[in-house]
Image (cartoon, helix red, strand yellow):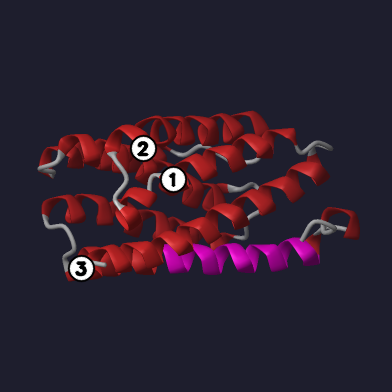
Protein backbone atom coordinates (compact mmCIF):
# COMPACT_ATOMS: atom_id res chain seq x y z
CA UNK A 1 0.00 0.00 0.00
CA UNK A 2 1.22 3.50 -0.85
CA UNK A 3 2.36 5.42 2.30
CA UNK A 4 -0.14 8.20 1.52
CA UNK A 5 -3.01 5.70 1.42
CA UNK A 6 -1.78 4.11 4.64
CA UNK A 7 -1.72 7.47 6.43
CA UNK A 8 -5.14 8.43 5.09
CA UNK A 9 -6.41 5.03 6.14
CA UNK A 10 -5.18 5.66 9.69
CA UNK A 11 -6.98 8.97 9.69
CA UNK A 12 -10.01 7.16 8.30
CA UNK A 13 -10.07 4.93 11.37
CA UNK A 14 -10.08 8.07 13.53
CA UNK A 15 -12.92 9.46 11.42
CA UNK A 16 -14.93 6.26 11.92
CA UNK A 17 -14.31 6.51 15.66
CA UNK A 18 -15.39 10.15 15.64
CA UNK A 19 -18.57 9.32 13.73
CA UNK A 20 -19.49 6.62 16.23
CA UNK A 21 -18.74 8.84 19.24
CA UNK A 22 -20.73 11.74 17.76
CA UNK A 23 -23.69 9.49 17.13
CA UNK A 24 -23.52 7.98 20.62
CA UNK A 25 -23.29 11.42 22.23
CA UNK A 26 -26.21 12.71 20.16
CA UNK A 27 -28.28 9.62 20.89
CA UNK A 28 -27.92 9.96 24.64
CA UNK A 29 -28.50 13.71 24.74
CA UNK A 30 -31.49 13.37 22.44
CA UNK A 31 -32.94 10.59 24.56
CA UNK A 32 -32.60 12.69 27.71
CA UNK A 33 -33.71 16.05 26.31
CA UNK A 34 -36.25 15.02 23.66
CA UNK A 35 -37.30 11.60 24.88
CA UNK A 36 -36.53 9.98 21.52
CA UNK A 37 -33.62 8.51 19.63
CA UNK A 38 -35.06 8.51 16.13
CA UNK A 39 -33.28 11.63 14.85
CA UNK A 40 -29.81 10.40 15.79
CA UNK A 41 -30.43 7.33 13.63
CA UNK A 42 -30.30 9.59 10.58
CA UNK A 43 -26.98 10.96 11.81
CA UNK A 44 -25.63 7.45 12.24
CA UNK A 45 -26.71 6.45 8.74
CA UNK A 46 -25.24 9.67 7.32
CA UNK A 47 -22.01 8.99 9.16
CA UNK A 48 -21.75 5.47 7.77
CA UNK A 49 -22.36 6.74 4.22
CA UNK A 50 -19.72 9.40 4.79
CA UNK A 51 -17.25 6.80 6.02
CA UNK A 52 -17.66 4.94 2.75
CA UNK A 53 -16.13 7.96 1.05
CA UNK A 54 -12.84 7.11 2.72
CA UNK A 55 -12.84 3.56 1.40
CA UNK A 56 -11.67 4.81 -1.99
CA UNK A 57 -8.56 6.19 -0.32
CA UNK A 58 -7.85 2.86 1.34
CA UNK A 59 -8.79 0.21 -1.23
CA UNK A 60 -9.26 2.21 -4.44
CA UNK A 61 -12.93 1.53 -5.20
CA UNK A 62 -14.41 3.08 -8.33
CA UNK A 63 -15.76 6.62 -8.16
CA UNK A 64 -19.17 5.55 -9.46
CA UNK A 65 -19.55 3.31 -6.41
CA UNK A 66 -18.69 6.14 -4.01
CA UNK A 67 -20.75 8.96 -5.54
CA UNK A 68 -24.19 8.28 -4.04
CA UNK A 69 -23.04 7.55 -0.45
CA UNK A 70 -20.78 10.62 -0.49
CA UNK A 71 -23.69 12.88 -1.45
CA UNK A 72 -26.36 11.32 0.77
CA UNK A 73 -24.15 11.19 3.88
CA UNK A 74 -23.81 14.96 4.45
CA UNK A 75 -27.48 15.50 3.58
CA UNK A 76 -28.63 13.06 6.28
CA UNK A 77 -26.26 14.54 8.86
CA UNK A 78 -27.46 18.09 8.21
CA UNK A 79 -31.07 16.90 8.40
CA UNK A 80 -30.50 15.15 11.72
CA UNK A 81 -28.75 18.14 13.29
CA UNK A 82 -31.36 20.63 12.08
CA UNK A 83 -34.27 18.52 13.28
CA UNK A 84 -32.80 17.80 16.71
CA UNK A 85 -32.38 21.44 17.71
CA UNK A 86 -29.38 20.39 19.81
CA UNK A 87 -26.80 22.19 17.66
CA UNK A 88 -26.57 25.95 17.17
CA UNK A 89 -25.90 26.82 13.54
CA UNK A 90 -23.03 29.27 13.02
CA UNK A 91 -21.94 31.33 9.97
CA UNK A 92 -18.47 29.80 10.15
CA UNK A 93 -19.99 26.46 9.12
CA UNK A 94 -20.94 28.05 5.79
CA UNK A 95 -17.46 29.55 5.49
CA UNK A 96 -15.87 26.15 6.03
CA UNK A 97 -18.10 24.58 3.39
CA UNK A 98 -17.23 27.45 1.02
CA UNK A 99 -13.49 26.78 1.52
CA UNK A 100 -14.00 23.09 0.74
CA UNK A 101 -16.08 23.81 -2.36
CA UNK A 102 -13.63 26.49 -3.49
CA UNK A 103 -10.74 24.04 -3.27
CA UNK A 104 -12.21 22.10 -6.19
CA UNK A 105 -10.38 24.46 -8.56
CA UNK A 106 -7.06 23.18 -7.16
CA UNK A 107 -7.72 19.53 -7.88
CA UNK A 108 -6.68 17.68 -11.02
CA UNK A 109 -9.05 14.71 -10.70
CA UNK A 110 -12.31 16.63 -10.43
CA UNK A 111 -14.73 13.69 -10.24
CA UNK A 112 -12.85 11.91 -7.47
CA UNK A 113 -12.20 15.13 -5.60
CA UNK A 114 -15.87 16.15 -5.71
CA UNK A 115 -16.73 12.87 -3.99
CA UNK A 116 -14.00 13.35 -1.39
CA UNK A 117 -15.18 16.94 -0.85
CA UNK A 118 -18.67 15.78 0.08
CA UNK A 119 -17.16 13.39 2.62
CA UNK A 120 -14.97 16.21 3.95
CA UNK A 121 -18.00 18.48 4.35
CA UNK A 122 -19.76 15.83 6.40
CA UNK A 123 -16.76 15.36 8.69
CA UNK A 124 -16.43 19.12 9.24
CA UNK A 125 -20.16 19.36 10.04
CA UNK A 126 -19.78 16.57 12.59
CA UNK A 127 -16.78 18.34 14.14
CA UNK A 128 -18.83 21.54 14.33
CA UNK A 129 -21.62 19.58 15.96
CA UNK A 130 -19.30 18.77 18.86
CA UNK A 131 -18.33 22.45 19.05
CA UNK A 132 -21.83 23.90 18.93
CA UNK A 133 -23.87 21.43 20.95
CA UNK A 134 -25.93 23.49 23.38
CA UNK A 135 -24.40 21.48 26.24
CA UNK A 136 -20.73 21.66 25.16
CA UNK A 137 -18.53 23.52 27.69
CA UNK A 138 -16.80 26.52 26.15
CA UNK A 139 -13.24 25.18 26.40
CA UNK A 140 -14.12 21.93 24.63
CA UNK A 141 -16.16 23.80 22.06
CA UNK A 142 -13.08 25.83 21.16
CA UNK A 143 -11.01 22.68 20.69
CA UNK A 144 -13.70 21.14 18.49
CA UNK A 145 -13.82 24.32 16.41
CA UNK A 146 -10.04 24.15 16.06
CA UNK A 147 -10.28 20.57 14.80
CA UNK A 148 -12.94 21.61 12.25
CA UNK A 149 -10.79 24.46 10.93
CA UNK A 150 -7.68 22.27 10.73
CA UNK A 151 -9.64 19.71 8.74
CA UNK A 152 -11.07 22.47 6.54
CA UNK A 153 -7.56 23.78 5.77
CA UNK A 154 -6.35 20.25 5.05
CA UNK A 155 -8.79 20.00 2.12
CA UNK A 156 -7.38 22.78 -0.14
CA UNK A 157 -3.79 22.01 0.87
CA UNK A 158 -4.23 18.38 -0.07
CA UNK A 159 -5.97 19.33 -3.31
CA UNK A 160 -3.08 21.56 -4.32
CA UNK A 161 -0.35 19.15 -3.23
CA UNK A 162 -1.70 15.67 -2.38
CA UNK A 163 0.14 13.97 0.43
CA UNK A 164 2.19 17.00 1.48
CA UNK A 165 3.51 16.76 5.05
CA UNK A 166 1.55 19.84 6.14
CA UNK A 167 -1.72 18.53 4.71
CA UNK A 168 -1.28 15.06 6.16
CA UNK A 169 -0.28 16.54 9.52
CA UNK A 170 -3.43 18.67 9.62
CA UNK A 171 -5.53 15.66 8.70
CA UNK A 172 -4.19 13.46 11.48
CA UNK A 173 -4.09 16.23 14.12
CA UNK A 174 -7.62 17.40 13.38
CA UNK A 175 -9.17 13.93 13.55
CA UNK A 176 -7.19 12.98 16.67
CA UNK A 177 -8.22 16.21 18.42
CA UNK A 178 -11.85 15.67 17.43
CA UNK A 179 -11.88 12.16 18.89
CA UNK A 180 -10.20 13.41 22.09
CA UNK A 181 -12.85 16.13 22.49
CA UNK A 182 -15.66 13.64 21.95
CA UNK A 183 -14.24 11.26 24.55
CA UNK A 184 -14.05 14.16 27.00
CA UNK A 185 -17.64 15.18 26.23
CA UNK A 186 -18.78 11.67 27.05
CA UNK A 187 -17.23 12.18 30.47
CA UNK A 188 -19.05 15.50 30.79
CA UNK A 189 -22.29 13.73 29.90
CA UNK A 190 -21.77 11.20 32.66
CA UNK A 191 -21.13 13.97 35.18
CA UNK A 192 -24.05 16.22 34.19
CA UNK A 193 -26.87 13.90 33.27
CA UNK A 194 -28.67 11.33 35.43
CA UNK A 195 -28.02 7.64 35.11
CA UNK A 196 -30.93 7.26 32.67
CA UNK A 197 -29.02 9.33 30.11
CA UNK A 198 -25.88 7.23 30.49
CA UNK A 199 -27.23 3.71 30.05
CA UNK A 200 -26.06 3.53 26.46
CA UNK A 201 -22.52 4.75 27.19
User: In the image, what residue occupies the spot 64% across and 47% down?
Assistant: 134
Front-lying residue, 102 or 111: 111
| Residue located beneath label 1 in the image | 52
| Residue located beneath label 2 in the image | 66
User: In the image, what residue occupies the spot 60% across and 54% down?
Assistant: 20
The quarter of the picture where the C terminus appears is bottom right
Q: Is residue 24 left or right of residue 68?
A: right
Q: Is residue 73 left or right of residue 34?
A: left
Label 1: state its secondary structure.
Answer: helix
Q: Looking at the image, is mark 3 or mark 2 earlier in the sequence?
A: 2
The residues tagged by marks 1 and 3 sit, at their Cα atoms, a distance apart of: 25 Å
Mark number, residue 166 = 3
Q: Is residue 161 left or right of residue 201?
A: left
Q: Specify few, some or many for label 3: CA neighbours under 10 Å numbering under 14, 14-19, or 20 or more.
A: few
**Labels 3, 2: front one:** 2
**Labels 1, 3: front one:** 1
- Against 26, is 82 above or below? above
Residue 161 percent coordinates (x, y) = 12, 57
Residue 149 percent coordinates (x, y) = 35, 55
Front-lying residue, 147 or 162: 162
Amino acid sequence: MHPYHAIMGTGGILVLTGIFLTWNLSRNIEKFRLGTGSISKFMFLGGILTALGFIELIVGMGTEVMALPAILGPALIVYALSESGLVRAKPEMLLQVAVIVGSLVLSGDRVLYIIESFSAMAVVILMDAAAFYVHTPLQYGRLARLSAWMFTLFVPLNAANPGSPVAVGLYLLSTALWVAVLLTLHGVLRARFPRTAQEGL
